[in-house]
Amino acid sequence: MHTFTQKEIFELRRMLDLEKLDIRCMTVGVNLLDCADRSLSRTADNVYKKMVNRLARLVPVCEEVESLIGIPIVNKRASVTPISLISGPCVAAGETDLTPIAEALDRAARECGIDFLGGFSALVQKGMGAADRALFNSIPRAIATTERVCCSLNVATTRAGMNMNAIREVGHVLKRLAENTATSGGIGCAKLVTFANIPEDNPFMAGAMHGVGESDTVLNCGVSGPGAVAAALSKMPTDMDLGSMANKIKEVSFKVTRLGSLALSMVAERMGYQEGVVDLSLAPTPRVGDSVAEILEIMGLEMAGTHGTVAALALLTDAVKKGGAMAANAVGGLSGAFIPVSEDIPMDDAAKAGILTLDKLEAMSAVCSVGLDMVVVPGYTKPETLSAIIADEIAIGVMNNKTTAVRIIPAPGKVPGDNVEFGGLLGRATVMPVKDCSPLILIERGGQIPAPIHSMRN
């Protein structure tokens, strides 16, 4: 158990009161492999019962810890074994629609007060089995008809290469999901993320899932604190050099992560679950003063997305990792800086001004984990264009041996420059233009893009 000095406690209270400091989420990961059954209804029932058993105490325990340390734990979440891995028996028995499992997860989350639940997922980096195909086909209905269930698809790894057949299918899945949630701006697509090199201990949504190599039940924590970083940098002399800025970011990241590590230990001990990782990621929200783009602008950019943005983001991401890694026993998840356009008001302002583009976001993903995150494109965008945008981002992750991911929303009926309001943590977004030049022949070729030569590390 971590202990804090009186000075540290005073500093943390100041950060809470003035700099929007919070613990972004506590996420319980649950192994569902023992829930599999040839009957889809029995599988769904097994899933519901196990999730209620594991999650029933999470919210009250988090509230107890909140009152003890005086810091809010904003989101209480859960993740599960990728559903394609437990649905094999019922798919073999003839089931093709896995929506009942998603509905069971959603019902358990709602009854236990869980904000989001991740793991309606498939790992298809080298190919797709029958259960994977069933899950892909189920996504448009399952995600549209549930409130809290999130989906992730791992379509590539550095060791396996890129499954272009799966990437091609994702474009069509996104279009159907957007149509099924058209009255809400295509919001269903905000709960679907496509990965390269997916981390198995990520507490953040929509990409959280419970890894096969994890213990039966584990608790992971996501910290944040872009407001604390921005406040610290804004107080520095205007002529401060970038190296000194990096040191200040490391200092703040250490304090924020130390707080998260303390809260994780307290909640895990009270729940009786294994203590997992702290994810260090700076995660913005639509609240004023809780923005990654604002940090980049304090560093010296007139607006996020202009020339120099990748360099500034590289400094920020590296400093966050270095500062936070020393403050926790185990660091995992994505651990960097998130740049979800709709959830970051200055980021969306830059998109509206035409300074922040899809191409620039793609370049930024070379130095952070999720570069095309919560971006909205016109509803008329074709499936092959969506797949090609995803393929470009996934290729960056594969070639650079890092995690990259895409959350892209083709908003039905919307054109470039329109606004889409999602509400809550998902915020609002300006519809960004896409290139009017078809990648159809490339995407339709399908197949596997081989792993890069530097993947041979045995």
Image: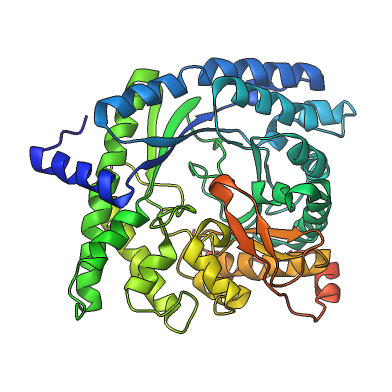
Q: Residue at x 80, y 68 (%)?
A: 381
Counting from the top left corner in percent of width and height, residue 286 is at 49, 54
Depth check: 427 or 255 in front? Answer: 427
Depth check: 147 or 441 in front? Answer: 147
Q: Residue at x 72, y 72 (%)?
A: 416
Counting from the top left corner in percent of width and height, residue 190 is at 65, 50
Side of 197 where 422 appears, left or right = right
Q: Is residue 225 above or below residue 273?
A: below
Side of 310 where 374 appears, left or right = right
Q: Residue at x 29, y 46 (%)?
A: 257
In the orientation shown, which residue stands out farthest toward the bottom? Answer: 307
Task: Report if residue 272 is visible in the image.
Answer: no
Counting from the top left corner in percent of width and height, residue 74 is at 43, 37
In the orientation shown, which residue stands out farthest toward the right? Answer: 94
Q: Is residue 203 above or below residue 160?
A: above
Q: Residue at x 61, y 25 (%)?
A: 110
Side of 373 where 301 appears, left or right = left
Counting from the top left corner in percent of width and height, residue 8 is at 14, 43
Q: The N terminus lies in which quarter of the figure?
A: top left
Q: Is residue 379 above or below residue 352?
A: above
